[in-house]
Image (spheres, rainbow, N blue to C red):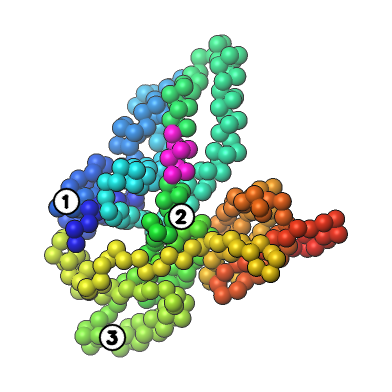
């Protein structure tokens, strides 16, 4: 359709090259006109984009007695592939290289870690980075003159500063519903539906916009007779469950193919079945997952948390941060100044949103605060 497009695979077990039937690597490659693709390779990223950090970690491990080859392999730390993938988003946006950036992500758990990484890293930088930087400076002037173990260089610290700046930019891009949206893929199967419902909840917790649901591997009406009657009845039952659970979210339907779907010809057929004449870049919803407004003399922080109940949610307020925990996932929400000096006195669920109410509380409000 003329859009400058790139597909970025963030799954460590890449399948994008197989799907496109085109060889890919850690470098951006042109597949055809207006279409580029890359499978993020953390070792390539370390060699080209993380030199100072990689050099320090390698030197440090060698100083501890590790052989150089093993030390180089150990320079890859957990989360680096996530940062690399997210930094591509920042780079593409900053340089206006593409009209559409498609992130082909890993299964649910890894995707949630990827998309929550900016929020999590922001907390660590705020709480720990200043202490780390000051400790390094003091160490250079004291014990650093007497020890053989290398201390982080200025270049290393500058790289960390750059990481913090870029991650803040990524966070703004991901949480802007006019720029970024998420499309969940679900199969008409009970376990997959439940997993997708949880993913929907957790993504909203991190203020990310889920704007569409793709229902995959559907038996087409025309092929109904080629499958056991029980399978068709099962699909109809789970389609009702999907409609009840996710409505009014827009839904796209992807048919089941009798053969593998890879290569441009079959992908074009799949695209025609899913989108028809619709522009695939159309944004179906820009409803924000988090909103702050005033009503009846109270400030209200509204969080979209579908498929959640009061019993699953825990709230804590610590200074200028509101900690919201849902299931295994926790988010620290930095409160605006207008809410920092107020107490969260009430919380309720209404139409799939958690409404947290803030108000001024005097000395007589101590018991109410504790109860909340």
What secondary structure is marked by label 1?
A: strand
Q: Are marks 2 and 1 in contact (CB under 8 Å)?
A: no
**Residue 17 location in percent, x, y?**
22, 53
Relative vertical location of residue 243 with respect to residue 365 in this rendering, above or below: below
* Total count of labels: 3
Would residue 268 be found to the left or right of residue 126 on screen? left
The magenta segment: 162-169
Give the residue at the far top of this rendering. 146
Of marks 1 and 3, which one's residue comes earlier in the chain?
1
Residue placed most toward the observer, 204 or 297: 297
Does residue 311 appear in this view?
no
Magenta span: helix, strand or loop, mainly? helix
Q: Please tell me in which quadrant of the rendered image residue 258 appears.
A: bottom left
Residue placed most toward the observer, 357 or 88: 357
Judge the density around disc 2: few (<14), some (14-19), many (≥20) Cα neighbours within 10 Å.
some
Image quadrant containing the N terminus? bottom left
Of marks 3 and 2, which one's residue comes earlier in the chain?
2
Q: Which residue is mark 2?
A: 175
Does the magenta-highlighted stretch encompass residue 168? yes
**Residue 7 location in percent, x, y?**
27, 53
Point 46% across, 21% down: residue: 153
What secondary structure is marked by label 3?
A: loop
Give the residue at the far right of this rendering. 364
Judge the density around disc 1: few (<14), some (14-19), many (≥20) Cα neighbours within 10 Å.
some
Q: Which disc number belongs to residue 228?
A: 3
Q: Are marks 3 and 2 in contact (CB under 8 Å)?
A: no
Distance of label 3 from label 2 (alpha carbons): 44 Å
Front position among marks 2 and 1: 2
Front position among marks 1 and 3: 1
């Amino acid at each position: 359709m003329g859009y400058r497009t790139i597909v970025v695979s963030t799954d460590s077990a890449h399948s994008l090259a197989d799907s496109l039937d085109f060889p890919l690597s850690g470098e951006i490659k042109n597949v055809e006109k207006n279409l580029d693709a890359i499978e993020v390779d953390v070792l390539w990223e370390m060699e080209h984009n993380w030199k100072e950090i990689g050099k320090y970690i390698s030197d440090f491990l060698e100083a501890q007695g590790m052989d150089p080859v093993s030390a180089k392999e150990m320079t890859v730390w957990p989360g680096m592939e996530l940062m690399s993938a997210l930094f591509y988003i920042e780079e593409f946006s900053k340089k206006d290289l593409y009209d559409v950036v498609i992130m082909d992500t890993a299964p649910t758990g890894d995707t949630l870690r990827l998309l929550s990484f900016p929020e999590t890293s922001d907390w660590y930088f705020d709480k720990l980075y200043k202490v780390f930087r000051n400790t390094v400076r003091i160490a250079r002037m004291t014990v650093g003159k007497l020890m053989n173990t290398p201390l982080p260089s200025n270049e290393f610290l500058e790289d960390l500063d750059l990481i913090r700046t870029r991650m803040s930019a990524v966070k703004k891009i991901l949480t802007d519903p006019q720029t970024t949206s998420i499309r969940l893929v679900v199969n008409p199967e009970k376990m997959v539906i439940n997993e997708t419902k949880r993913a929907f909840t957790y993504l909203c917790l991190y203020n990310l916009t889920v704007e569409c649901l793709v229902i995959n591997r559907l038996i087409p009406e025309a092929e109904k007779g080629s499958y056991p009657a029980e399978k068709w009845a099962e699909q109809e039952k789970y389609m009702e469950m999907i409609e009840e659970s996710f409505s009014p979210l827009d839904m796209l339907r992807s048919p089941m193919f009798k053969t593998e779907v890879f290569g441009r010809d079959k992908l074009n057929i799949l695209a025609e079945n899913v989108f028809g004449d619709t522009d695939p870049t159309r944004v179906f919803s820009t409803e924000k997952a988090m909103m702050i407004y005033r009503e009846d003399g109270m400030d209200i922080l509204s969080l979209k948390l579908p498929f959640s109940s009061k019993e699953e949610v825990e709230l804590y307020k610590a200074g200028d941060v509101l900690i919201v925990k849902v299931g295994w996932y926790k988010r620290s929400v930095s409160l605006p100044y207008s809410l920092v000096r107020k107490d969260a006195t009430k919380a309720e669920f209404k139409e799939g949103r958690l409404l947290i109410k803030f108000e001024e509380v005097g000395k007589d409000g101590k018991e109410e605060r504790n109860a909340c």
